[in-house]
Amino acid sequence: MPKAGRYHEGVPCWVVLTTPDVPRAQRFYGALFAWEFVPTGPGEAVATRHGAQVAAIASAPRAASAAWSTYLACADLSRTVALIRATDGRIAREPYEVPDQGRAALAVDPLGAPFGLWQGDAVDGAGLVNEPGTLAWNEHLSPDPDAARAFYREVFGYGYDRPRAGHTLARVAGLPACGIGPSDPPRAGAAWRTHFGTADVDRAAARLHTLGGSVLTDPEPTPFGRSALVRDDAGAEFVLIAVPSDESAEAA
């Protein structure tokens, strides 16, 4: 994903974990990624790494499933909300203010995948990316990638490379932004999937397992780096993906 800074329209810029047990999540991700946490409200905290904001955790109802949500950058939240409604998406939470940071909203695309919208003010999004223990990539998976591509092109102006095995690289301002492809298994519902960087996927997957998480697919090479699909100890899925690191000892 593009480096932190001024995020282009439609680029994934932030991720939020909603979970029934925030302290439990803090213990898990603190041990896995060496995150530290700054409380931001009742049942809410921002995760930091090397002092930079990298993600957020928020409480969910006890009966709800834990899940990571992807937020896409937008320059004009009201305009983006209107475009989503005009292209058969819906707004799950109307735009709201995040004091001293920006404005946000929650949406659901026509395939049924929830995602967030972020209009940054003082905070553009993640302050550190593409490093171990930080956001490295996001992809949209659904039974109908063509419909997903059409929706996100209309709303955010995505351009696409030629599909490979049904997967497409989406670009914004000519730069890689995210991926869009078929869900696996094909009948699975639509969702955005978060990838976190790690210096050593095999070691991180083994550590995740000892922390009570689950490894859904063993680490394996991909065109984008060695990766593994995993779940945290509350059931939230994400991907561990190898990224370069200059650190000799890396918690992630």
Image: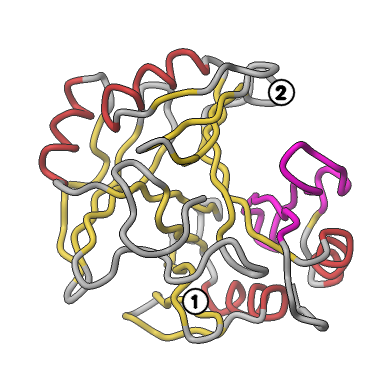
Q: Is residue 32 above or below residue 167?
A: below
Q: How is the image coloured?
A: secondary structure
Quadrant, the C terminus: bottom right
* Residue 42 placement (x, y as % from top left): 34, 79
* Residue 189 placement (x, y as % from top left): 56, 26
Of 89 and 147, which appears nearest the observer?
Answer: 147
Residue indicated by mark 1: 47
**Quick check: is 13 in the magenta stretch?**
no
Disc 2 packing (10 Å; few <14; some 14–19; many ≥20): few
* Residue drawn at the location 63% of the way across and 58% of the way down: 196
Instruction: Estimate the spatial distance between the alpha carbons at disc 2 and disc 1, rounded to whole Å.
Output: 32 Å
Of 132 and 3, which appears nearest the observer?
Answer: 3
Q: Which mark is residue 103?
A: none
* Residue 136 placement (x, y as % from top left): 59, 55
Disc 1 packing (10 Å; few <14; some 14–19; many ≥20): many
Residue range in magenta is 215-243
Q: Toward which corner of the image does residue 45 lie, by quadrant? A: bottom left
The type of residue carrying mark 2 is Pro
